[in-house]
Amino acid sequence: MKKKKLTRIIVGSLIVLILCITSYLLYDPGRPTPIPIKQNLHEGVTYHRVVRFIPYPLIAHIIEIDTKTKGIQLLITPPDSDGETPLNARTTSQFLDEFDLQIAINGDGFLPWWSHSPADYYPHSGDPVTPFGFTASIGEVYSMGIETAPGVKPTLYISRRNVISFNNPPGKIYNAISGDRMIVLKGEVAPDLDDQDVEPRTAIGTNRNGRYLYLIVIDGRQPFYSRGATFTELAQLLINQGVYVAMSLDGGGSSTMVIEGEDGQPVILNSPIDNYIPGRERPVANHLGVYVK
């Protein structure tokens, strides 16, 4: 009886797996295949694709970066102008291409923003926007944060020598980017995180001594492919990778991870979904980029 039960479980699991893969292929063959991957992108840079089917489909894209590797530098989107709207919106691919980066993810939330339909949305590429939180790039502080944004936004600080700290500004600020909320604290899931809303997510974290930087993007809002994750699930995925402290960045239709391809052109690693259109990138305010020379 035990063998028959085990056989039924195995056969049932294979049927579920085949149905998920078949549904994905029929739904959109252009997206990343839902198969776990571990790949070295550069010296000191590793890409992981995490795939889960239960309790619902989830695909996570994780890049682990050894910040002590020679030639690695980090960049936050520089300002385009002075004033209340210091940035011109760009997609993450445009940011990577414009600044000749090798890796990029979307950054902080921003205003103004709306998304009523594929024809009625803001911003378009080039439209002026303001990030929600404190922001600096290459020694220039260009946003102190929006007073109307709810709560105090957590901030990641990055020194010229890639020393990384959360919510502890150094004497001389070099790069800084803010996020939505802290999700991992001292290797544990941060208290009072939402564990109900399942959405696309972007987050950034470090290991205990701050040497390894982790970038994660989770695809979502795509039935039979990847539904997304709650904040609690996002935090646990990072902890499973060895993250000690982390904050979430802007999620939803903004969540995008891009690398430079062999031909020098941007390659989107995940499946972004702006206006519920899979593969469509949203122009956003700021980003975090990585040079690998």
Image (spheres, grey):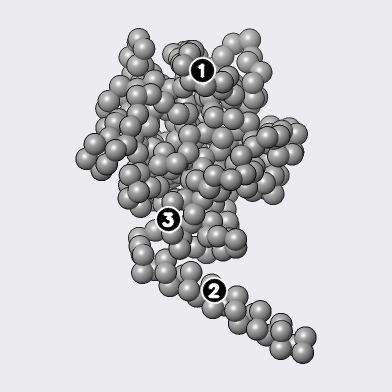
Q: Is residue 66 visible?
A: no
Residue 9 x %, y %: 66, 79
- Please say if the residues under marks 3 and 2 sit with CB atoms less than 8 Å apart: no
The answer to whether the residues at label 1 and label 3 have Cβ atoms under 8 Å apart is no
Quadrant where the N terminus is found in the figure: bottom right
Q: Residue at x 39, y 58 (%)?
A: 31
Mark 3 is surrounded, within 10 Å at the Cα level, by few (under 14), some (14 to 19) or many (20 or more) other residues, namely: many
Label 1 secondary element: strand
**Kind of residue at badge 1:** Phe
Categorize mark 1 by other alpha carbons within 10 Å: few (<14), some (14-19), many (20+). many
**Residue 222: mark:** 3
**x and y percentages locating residue 58 in the rendered image:** 54, 56
Q: CA distance from mark 1 to mark 3?
A: 32 Å
Of residues 44 and 159, the one nearer the viewer is: 159
> Which residue is tagged 2?
16
Q: Amino acid at mark 2?
A: Val
Residue 147, position as x, y percentages in the image = 48, 13
Mark 1 lies on residue: 134
The residue under label 3 is which amino acid type? Gln
